[in-house]
Amino acid sequence: GAVVSQHPSRVICKSGTSVKIECRSLDFQATTMFWYRQFPKKSLMLMATSNEGSKATYEQGVEKDKFLINHASLTLSTLTVTSAHPEDSSFYICSAAETGLGETQYFGPGTRLLVL
Amino acid sequence: RKEVEQDPGPFNVPEGATVAFNCTYSNSASQSFFWYRQDCRKEPKLLMSVYSSGNEDGRFTAQLNRASQYISLLIRDSKLSDSATYLCVVNRAYNTDKLIFGTGTRLQVFP
């Protein structure tokens, strides 16, 4: 089956620093990847859609200058949380849709971010 | 109104019980419907897609009522390993991969 990996699985950082999270599709190509955030006991919220070779599209209320997304290849998208603050602490999950095969999305294992 | 609404539970049921979860969605243009399962502190995993005619996968049966914008999941003969949060998921609108997640219904199966 399709596998999506994320790195790191968890990160603790100081307030004001930037954190980069990688999302890779390991055995398939993904034109589109999605970034979600999940706070405790809440639903996954779509943050942005990452498109290979073009700019990401952000959901309403998500600051594009704070959450930088780069989708440089068909197997890698990165999310950088810039100038992280404690309120950015959350579970960040990516998903990837296999190119040309419709809507099945495969989720990465998530990255747990704690900003002190 | 939330785009996808679910009863958060928890549903505490004994092994072997049958349990049903319901979900309503607000966007009549949604075309794709899914149930995902999420274990504590893990990523969601696709349980099954939901088709208009209803579909079954082993002990799991999903139903869709487009007129009422209502989706259901029935689990028969519950196992301890079924304990998890079940997420109702719809796509945002026709022909888009953007998924909207419900907050999930927590199921706890006890011996």
Image (cartoon, helix red, strand yellow):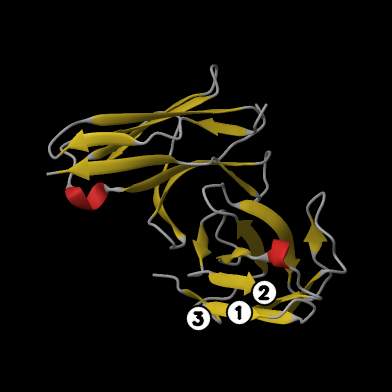
Marks 3,1: beta carbons within 8 A:
no
Determine the residue positioned at 67% across, 74% down.
A116
Determine the residue positioned at 16% across, 32% down.
B17
Q: Check disc 3 and report the residue beneath it.
A: A26
Q: Inspect the image, locate mark 1, and give the three-letter code of the amino acid beneath it.
A: Ile
Callout 2: few (<14), some (14-19), or many (20+) C-alpha neighbours within 10 Å? some
Kindly identify which chain the residue marked by label 1 belongs to: A
Determine the residue positioned at 65% across, 31% down.
B2
Q: Which mark is residue A12?
A: 1
Reading the chain from its start, which is encountered first: label 3 or label 1? 1
Q: Tell whether A114 sits left or right of A15.
A: left
Determine the residue positioned at 17% across, 43% down.
B110
Query: Marks 2 and 1: same chain?
Result: yes
Q: Check disc 2 and report the residue beneath it.
A: A116
Q: Classify mark 1: helix, strand or loop.
A: strand
User: Which image quadrant is residue A34 in?
Assistant: bottom right
User: Which image quadrant is residue B41 in?
Assistant: bottom left
Q: Nearer the viewer, residue A63 or A75?
A: A63
Q: Nearer the viewer, residue B72 or B106?
A: B106
Kindly identify which chain the residue marked by label 3 belongs to: A
Q: Tell whether B77 sits left or right of A42.
A: left
Marks 3,2: beta carbons within 8 A:
no
Q: Inspect the image, locate mark 2, and give the three-letter code of the amino acid beneath it.
A: Leu
Q: Nearer the viewer, residue A70 or B38?
A: B38
In the depicted structure, whether residue A42 falls above or below residue B66? below
